[in-house]
Image (cartoon, grey):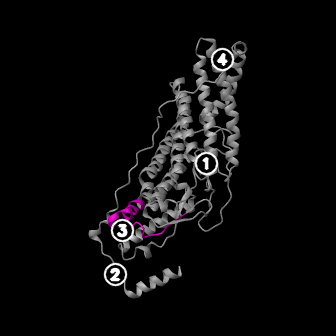
């Protein structure tokens, strides 16, 4: 799954495995046990605190026991927990800074973050929902019987479902960026983990849109109805998404766990997209009747071939970047282009070699066209707050002086 190493049951040693990646999943973060009962005692009803604590622990155990792969169970637990966390963010409750919430990296258990903010907890939960969704998309694009095969075969239905999941994950991250991050005070933002910084969130949601477009381009190649213009447009849109994602991530602090590997992934996909864009751009030019059209087409094909070679090197750099991942088999649009680009570049260079000699002044690489981007993040809205937050039904347990002093002593010791 994604880049996260597989984990045995909670508390046991991790077993080493080298994952295969189709959809890049940044580091998944999971909650660490926090003493909610002590922090919220006397402020909210005991049964509400118990539910918050139980769901939070359930999310941690599910994630550790399955390495985050139990998507349906994790999503249900996260969505239910979210309806409770929303209550902590309401100003009328005055509970925004009452609990010190702790989270850690699932892959290595390090990089623990601890922030006394309900908005941080809300941000972390929605971010985890996005990572689980990306993991689910990754699983769809890697068939269970793929081992030992140099070519990955994925059904059209799985590809369409993966695109839907990518748009859903993008919507979660876009919501984090627009609606949640702005509610966290500047002094607390400085303490957020690097993967929750605005630039990283933006790069990751744009990257998801780019991968969705890549899958759509692969589906277009398999369809007899899709025209060259449609394929070129999709390739150019994919290129734009990965260019934007690269710009966003390049401006971020990449010292967090998977930052450098994510940047390598985006660079690799950017080069692949550019190779595809120039290939289809060349095919359209080659339909022209003027000698200059054929010369320009050959320039596009040769550029695509060179970019393909660069993308191969970028893929290897990505796989070798920590944490190491397997070199993926060819799939989708690239399975097709790795065969077609060298073949067409060689054939067209031979066919129009005489024109290249005669029209040396025309041997310039044309600019790629720009198109309005088609894919957008799914709209996401927070669910309704859990009815348990209806204060009119609350019965708060009073605390004796002895209990209060014991809690105070425990707090000092901890």
Mark 1–mark 2 Cα distance, whole angstroms, equals: 51 Å
Q: Which residue is mark 1?
A: 262
Q: Residues under labels 3 and 2: Cα distance?
A: 19 Å
What residue did someone put label 2 on? Answer: 398
Describe residue 182's horizontal placement relative to residue 24 as left or right. Answer: left
- N-terminal of the pair, mark 1 or mark 3, is 3
Q: Residues under labels 1 and 3: Cα distance?
A: 38 Å
The residue where tag 3 is placed is 94
Q: Position of residue 117 (x, y in %)?
A: 45, 65
Query: Which quarter of the figure has residue 69?
Result: bottom right
Residue 117 is covered by the magenta coloring: no
Is residue 316 among what the camera can see? yes
- Residue 350 screen position, x and y as percent: 72, 17
Disc 3 or 4, which lies upstream in sequence? 3
Mark 3 secondary-structure assignment? loop
Image-based side of 34 in relation to 291, left or right? left
First reached walking from the N terminus: tag 1 or tag 4? 1
Identify the residue at horizontal 68%, vertical 17% (top origin).
361
Point out residue 185 in the picture as x, y percentages from the top left corner.
44, 60
Nearer to us in this view, 323 or 2: 323
- The residue wearing badge 4 is 362
């Amino acid at each position: 799954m994604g880049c996260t190493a597989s984990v045995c049951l909670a508390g046991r040693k991790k077993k080493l495995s080298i994952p295969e990646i189709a959809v890049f999943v940044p580091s998944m973060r999971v909650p660490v046990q926090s003493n909610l009962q002590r922090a919220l005692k006397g402020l909210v009803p005991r049964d509400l605190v118990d539910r918050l604590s139980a769901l939070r622990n359930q999310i941690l155990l599910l994630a550790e026991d399955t390495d985050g792969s139990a998507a349906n169970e994790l999503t249900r637990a996260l969505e239910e927990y979210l309806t409770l966390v929303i209550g902590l963010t309401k100003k009328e409750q005055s509970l925004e800074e009452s609990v010190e919430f702790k989270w850690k990296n699932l892959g290595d258990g390090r990089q623990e973050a601890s922030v006394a903010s309900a908005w941080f907890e809300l941000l972390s939960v929605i971010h985890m929902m996005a990572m689980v969704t990306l993991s689910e998309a990754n699983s769809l694009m890697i068939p269970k019987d793929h081992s030992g095969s140099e070519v990955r075969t994925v059904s059209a239905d799985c590809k369409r479902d993966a695109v839907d999941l990518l748009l859903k994950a993008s919507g979660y991250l876009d919501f984090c960026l627009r609606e949640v991050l702005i509610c966290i005070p500047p002094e607390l933002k400085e303490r957020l983990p690097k993967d929750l910084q605005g630039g990283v969130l933006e790069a990751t949601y744009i990257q998801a849109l780019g991968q969705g477009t890549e899958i759509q381009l692969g589906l277009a190649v398999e369809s007899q109805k899709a025209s060259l213009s449609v394929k070129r447009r999709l390739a150019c849109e994919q290129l734009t998404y990965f260019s934007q994602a690269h710009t966003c991530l390049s401006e971020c602090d990449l010292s967090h766990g998977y930052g450098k590997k994510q940047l390598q992934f985006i660079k690799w996909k950017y080069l692949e997209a550019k190779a595809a864009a120039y290939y289809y751009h060349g095919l359209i030019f080659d339909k022209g009747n003027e000698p200059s059209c054929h010369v320009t087409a050959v320039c596009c094909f040769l550029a695509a071939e060179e970019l393909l070679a660069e993308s191969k090197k970028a893929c290897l750099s990505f796989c070798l970047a920590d944490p190491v991942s397997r070199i993926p088999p060819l799939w989708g649009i690239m399975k097709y282009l790795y065969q077609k680009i060298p073949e067409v570049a060689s054939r067209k260079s031979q066919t129009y070699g005489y024109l290249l000699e005669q029209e040396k002044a025309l041997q310039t690489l044309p600019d790629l066209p720009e198109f309005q981007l088609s894919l957008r993040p799914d709209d996401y809205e927070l669910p309704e707050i859990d009815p348990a937050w209806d204060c009119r039904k609350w019965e708060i347990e009073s605390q004796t002086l002895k209990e209060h002093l014991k809690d105070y002593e425990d707090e000092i010791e901890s």
